[in-house]
Image (cartoon, rainbow, N blue to C red):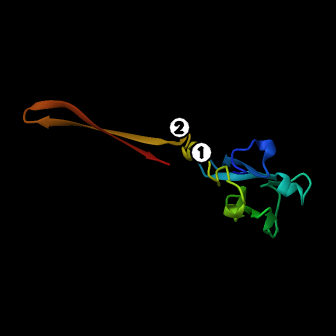
Amino acid sequence: MISIPKGDPVENALFRVEAEARRLGGQCEDIYFQEINITGPWVEAQLAGGLHFQASGVTGESPKWMTFGKVQVKVAHGHTQQGIHYLNFYVKHLGHAGFAVGGLLGEDDHKDVMIPPASCTHRAFMRSAQRTGRTPATSQSVAMATSE
């Protein structure tokens, strides 16, 4: 989700946030963060081993903003009325990091994760045959709609 500086190999990142997101509640339902890892020398300077969050099993917490370099982050646990546990991730001051920011929340391309899987795309095809005078026309009109 975040890699500072942008474009550096993972092992050289000063600050890195990785998350595991899953579709829960059905084949094409909402996507929820289930795990978040925050690593890199900026984090290690304060917390050996970095930070690891899991969605399940936490109740009654009071999430707080944490500062790493000039970036602030907060991770909060939540759950739906249906009992799905998830994580919320918040970040502030990426523009003050002092480096270009990569990842989904930075400057990297995120087209691949915007496109729903083919199994979650619903299509409707409509055809109409036109008639001109007495002779049927051979042209067709085709429309396609997708819903996400």
Q: Residue at x 80, y 45 (%)?
A: 12
User: Quick check: 139 above or below 47?
Assistant: above
Q: Whole-percent x and y of residue 18? A: 74, 49
Q: Is residue 134 left or right of residue 147?
A: left
Q: Residue at x 73, y 49 (%)?
A: 19
Alpha-carbon span between mark 1 and mark 2 = 12 Å
Which-is-in-front pick, marks 1 and 2?
A: 1
Circle 1: residue type: Val
Q: Is residue 145 left or right of residue 58?
A: left
User: Quick check: 13 above or below 89?
Assistant: above
User: Is 92 or 18 nearer to us in this picture?
Assistant: 92
Q: Residue at x 62, y 48 (%)?
A: 108
Q: Whole-percent x and y of residue 129? A: 21, 35
Q: Residues within 10 Å of mark 2 (few under 14, many from 20)?
A: few
Q: Which residue is the site of mark 1?
A: 113
Which tag, 1 or 2, sits closer to the chain's start? 1
Badge 1 marks a residue whose secondary structure is: helix
User: Is 106 or 89 nearer to us in this picture?
Assistant: 106
Q: Is residue 137 left or right of residue 101?
A: left
Circle 2: residue type: Ala
Badge 2 marks a residue whose secondary structure is: helix
Q: Residues within 10 Å of mark 1 (few under 14, many from 20)?
A: few
Residue at the left extreme of this rendering: 133
User: Is 86 or 91 nearer to us in this picture?
Assistant: 91
Identify the image quadrant of residue 93: bottom right
Q: Which mark is residue 118?
A: 2
Q: Whole-percent x and y of residue 91? A: 71, 62
Q: Is residue 43 left or right of residue 9?
A: right
